[in-house]
Amino acid sequence: MSQTFGMESPGKHHAGTSRPPVRYVVIIDGGGSAIARLMLETREQVQEFEGGTPEVVQMIQGLVPVKGAHGPEWDQALQAHSTQERMAAEVYTLPV
């Protein structure tokens, strides 16, 4: 009889490729409320939160934002937002 007492031992961990770290937090208006969009270095969105959540506040604490996400590098990522929303957006760059 084994020493696992009827419970199977966990399988071997397989190290796979992991997603790159989040580089940008973009706080932008989305239908009247602030939305925080988490973006990779490539400007690919990986997550979206309500802008005032404690997690978002903690992520951007002590960082100084750049005002506006209107450059061509943001066109694909923020195509659902108007020009006015993009100009008013706050872009925080996270230290990696």
Image (cartoon, rainbow, N blue to C red):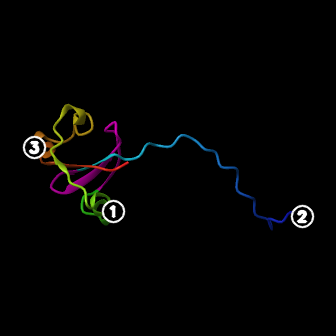
- The residue carrying mark 3 is 84
Q: In the rendering, which numbered label is found on residue 65?
A: none
Q: Position of residue 32 (x, y in %)?
A: 15, 55
- Which stretch did the figure color magenta? 27-49
Q: Residue at x 90, y 64 (%)?
A: 1
- As drawn, the residue found furthest toward the bottom would be 5
Question: Relative to 25, is 20 on the left or the right?
Answer: right
Alpha carbon separation for disc pair 1 and 3 = 26 Å
- The residue carrying mark 1 is 55
Alpha carbon separation for disc pair 3 and 2 = 69 Å
How crowded is the residue under tag 3: few (<14 C-alpha within 10 Å), some, or many (20+)? few
Magenta segment includes 88? no
Decide whether the magenta segment is chiefly helix, strand or loop: strand
Q: Position of residue 88 (x, y in %)?
A: 12, 48
- The residue carrying mark 2 is 1
Q: Nearer the viewer, mark 2 or mark 1?
A: 1
Q: Position of residue 70 (x, y in %)?
A: 16, 38
- As drawn, the residue found furthest toward the left would be 84
Identified by mark 1, the residue type is: Glu
Q: Position of residue 25 (x, y in %)?
A: 28, 50
Identified by mark 3, the residue type is: Gln
Q: Earlier in the sequence, mark 2 or mark 1?
A: 2
Question: Relative to 42, is 65 on the left or the right?
Answer: left
Alpha carbon separation for disc pair 2 and 1 = 48 Å
Look at the numbered disc 2 and give the secondary structure of its residue: loop
Q: Is residue 5 above or below residue 66?
A: below
Magenta segment includes 29? yes
Q: Residue at x 41, y 46 (%)?
A: 21
